[in-house]
Amino acid sequence: MHLMNFAEGGQFEPRKIAVALRTTAEEIGLTVGLGKDAMQRRTRVQSDKTQRRLRELVEILNKVEPRFGSELMAYAWYRSEPLPGFDGRTAMQLVQEGKAQQVLEYIDAVDAGVFA
């Protein structure tokens, strides 16, 4: 996922992310723990919280895309694969809880062979 493909005016654009992942902006909002308004109202899309959550999603997908071979497969992993050590929660559930940093650290640990 090339960052510039998902930005407009220096900020992440939910609709561009949604197009790449073949879904809707509303679904993108739900997968990062935000409501429908956060993806539709320009002021909410530009808010720090919305931009942070979108950035976290893109960072996570960027880290795992090489291992899955496509953005769509990385997104499927993000939404559905339970992560060991997190009580069966998925990356999506952790991001919704505001724990994206833990997901990123888990991915780094796996890449370093800690959980191999």
Image (cartoon, helix red, strand yellow):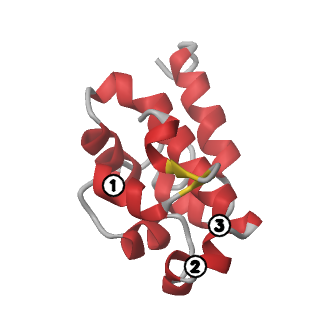
Q: Amino acid at mark 3?
A: Thr
Between 25 and 85, the residue placed more toward the observer is: 25
Residue beneath the point at 30% across and 49% down:
20
Mark 2 vs 3: CB contact within 8 A: yes
Q: Which residue is mark 2?
A: 38
In space, the residues marked 1 and 3 are separated at their CA atoms by 22 Å
Mark 2 vs 1: CB contact within 8 A: no
Q: Earlier in the sequence, mark 1 or mark 3?
A: 3
For the residue labelled by badge 3, is the local secondary structure a helix, a strand or a loop?
helix
In space, the residues marked 2 and 1 are separated at their CA atoms by 23 Å
For the residue labelled by badge 1, is the local secondary structure a helix, a strand or a loop?
helix
Q: Amino acid at mark 1?
A: Ser
Considering the image in quadrants, where does the N terminus appear? top left
Q: Which mark is residue 80?
A: 1
Image coordinates of residue 15 in percent, x first then y, are: 40, 64
Q: Is residue 12 above or below residue 112?
A: below
How many numbered callouts? 3
Crowd around label 2: few <14 · some 14–19 · many ≥20 (10 Å): many
Compared across the picture, whether 102 is left or right of 73 comes to right
Mark 1 vs 3: CB contact within 8 A: no
Q: Earlier in the sequence, mark 2 or mark 3?
A: 2
Q: Which residue is mark 3?
A: 50
- Quarter assignment of residue 25: bottom left
Q: Nearer the viewer, mark 2 or mark 1?
A: 2
